[in-house]
Amino acid sequence: GPRLSLSVARSLGPSPSLRRRLSLSLNLNLTMDYHAKSEQVLLFSARGLKNSDTFSKSDPYAVLSLMELGEWKDLGATETLQDTRDPDWVDQVCVTYFFEEEQLLRVQIFDKDESGNDDVLGSAEFSLGHLIGAVGMGLKLPLSPQGELIVRAEEKIETGLHVKVQLQGSKLKNKDGFFGKSDPFLEVTRANEDGSYSVVGRTPVIENNLSPVWPQLVLGAQRVSNGDLMRPLRMQIKDWDSNGSHDDMGHFETSLEELSVPGGSWPVSYNGKTKGSVSILGEPSQFTIPTFCDYLRGGLELNVRPKPKPKPEPKPKPGP
């Protein structure tokens, strides 16, 4: 690789005649990695989507594509959310960022239709480099023809650590008036660098219950906190509504580290006041699902065989 020579001089003595120069030459081997890359995790939200359904709101999902050799190549898609114009998708899509390449990405948002004829609700294009270089590694982009796309990126931290925990609420805020009870569910969100939060998990809905016991959560550290057990999490409690306009019932702040400790309990904050609480039920636990890199570090040997070249078809013999 290229070599860099540095010269460092120091003056000794009060006059030029007594000055001596101490030169130090450093030869640094600089190796340029022309294939420098990093794995990035992308998260998506949208606001103000157009409505393509006549009697209800759309059921949107997002598809991420990469421009390659003049064609769009699909990289992944999110889950479908029901009856909402302001989706916060949980599913994440991984993409490899090459530092020296211009990578054009496209997000298309579709309305899921049982007939299979999914309508396009909007699309936006952006450079992956622009996203990585943005403040907080996040962009807000106009969707064509209507709405706004919010996309965030984080460098992926490989970890197989998971936290298994069950949560129960107590005396939560009722949003359904005197003649009913709320249908609460939990939304797990993680803090971003710019102070915003991204949705990374949800529980099922518990109907007509202000002291719900949600099913056990299995929270993967990579998906939920990108490997940081102390990363702030906001657990948002919402009252499910069939029209998609889920009402806020309050929230509490925690982390994967706190969710791993038995006996944890948090007051629920609603409009600056405490309204109910959420606590850990039973014994939470941590377990690890080994990643591919873990297998390699453990001494896994791989036998890689090249794909055999197809044998050329025999040429027909010329006739007599």
Image: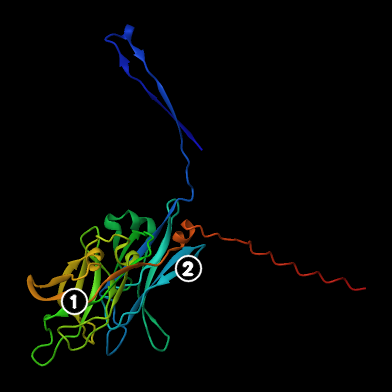
Foreground of the two, 52 or 19: 19
Determine whether 157 is above or below 14 in the image: below
How are the colours assigned in the image? rainbow
Q: Identify the residue shown where x is 20% and y is 60%.
A: 195
Q: Where is residue 291 in the image (x, y as percent from the top left)?
A: 43, 63
The number of discs equals 2
Q: In which quarter of the image is residue 8?
A: top left
Q: Is residue 95 above or below residue 282?
A: above
Which quadrant of the figure contains the C terminus? bottom right
Residue 162 or residue 299, whichever sits in front: 299
Residue 107 placement, left or right of 148? right
Q: Quadrant of residue 164?
A: bottom left
Q: Please tell me the numbered disc located at residue 73.
A: 2
Disc 1 on helix, strand or loop?
Answer: strand
SS at badge 2? strand
Q: Position of residue 177 (x, y in %)?
A: 9, 88
Q: Where is residue 200 in the image (x, y as percent from the top left)?
A: 29, 70
Can residue 293 be spotted in the picture? yes
Question: Going from the N terminus, do you reach mark 2 or mark 1 first?
Answer: 2
Query: Residue tagged by mark 1?
Result: 237
Please report the residue visible at 20 percent of the width from the left and 66 percent of the height from the top.
Answer: 254
